[in-house]
Amino acid sequence: MARLTLKHAKEEALDLLQHSWSHIELTFIKQVRDQLGWRGEVHIDKAGAEKRLLDAVFVHPDDQQYDGTGGIMYNGFTDGDMIWIERCCEYEQMVGTLIHEALHDCVFLIRPTRQMRYRGLSCEFEHSVFECLPIEGI
């Protein structure tokens, strides 16, 4: 039953992500320009965000982290390649968390250096942009 719920949540989250993508791109670019003063190119990896969302799995019970009151500390997390979702999420939380985690590590400033070409954004900056998006629950 939980796997079926996750499957449906992924489908709904992907649909919301795809329908909101133009607004997501514009919001990220505007915030990068306004908050960071960046005038160079910005790379937005839609395919990577969609792949992370579709590949999401449940957190193994041994890997759950609890706060001081015994509650779960988060609904999900990502390492930039994979998304892990808590089994105990309500459906709406699961959809929002999938979108939230998929949007992490998908926007890069193109800044060629000797070490790399793309510079990722900080988690704090990404969260400030998420607050500007019209998608509930992320």
Image (cartoon, rainbow, N blue to C red):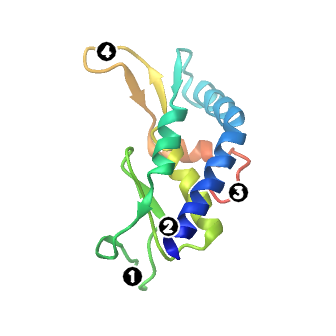
Query: What residue would you read off at disc 4?
Result: 113
Cα distance in 3D space between marks 4 and 2: 36 Å
Q: Is residue 47 above or below residue 132?
A: above
User: Mark 4 Cα within 10 Å, few/some/many (few <14, many 20+)?
Assistant: few
- Residue in view at x 46 percent, y 70 percent: 86
Residue under label 3:
136
What x and y, as percent, mark residue 85? Answer: 46, 64
Q: Residues within 10 Å of mark 3 (few under 14, many from 20)?
A: few
Chain-order first, disc 4 or disc 1: 1
Residue type at mark 3: give it.
Answer: Glu
Ranked by sequence position, the earlier of labels 3 and 1 is: 1
Secondary structure of residue under mark 3: loop
Q: For mark 1, give the secondary structure.
A: loop
Residue under pointer 2: 75
Relative to 76, say whether 23 is above or below: above
Secondary element type, mark 2: loop
Which is more toward the observer, 84 or 120? Answer: 84
Residue at image position (39%, 82%) is 68
Can you tell which mark lies on residue 68? 1
Residue 58 image offset from top left, x and y in percent:
42, 66
Viewer-nearest of discs 2 and 1: 2
Comparing marks 3 and 4, which lies closer to the viewer?
3
Eyeballing the image, is 132 above or below 70?
Answer: above
**Relative horizontal placement of residue 110, taking residue 10 as reference (left or right):** left
Label 1 amino acid? Gly
Instruction: Name the kind of residue labelled 4 in the image.
Output: Thr
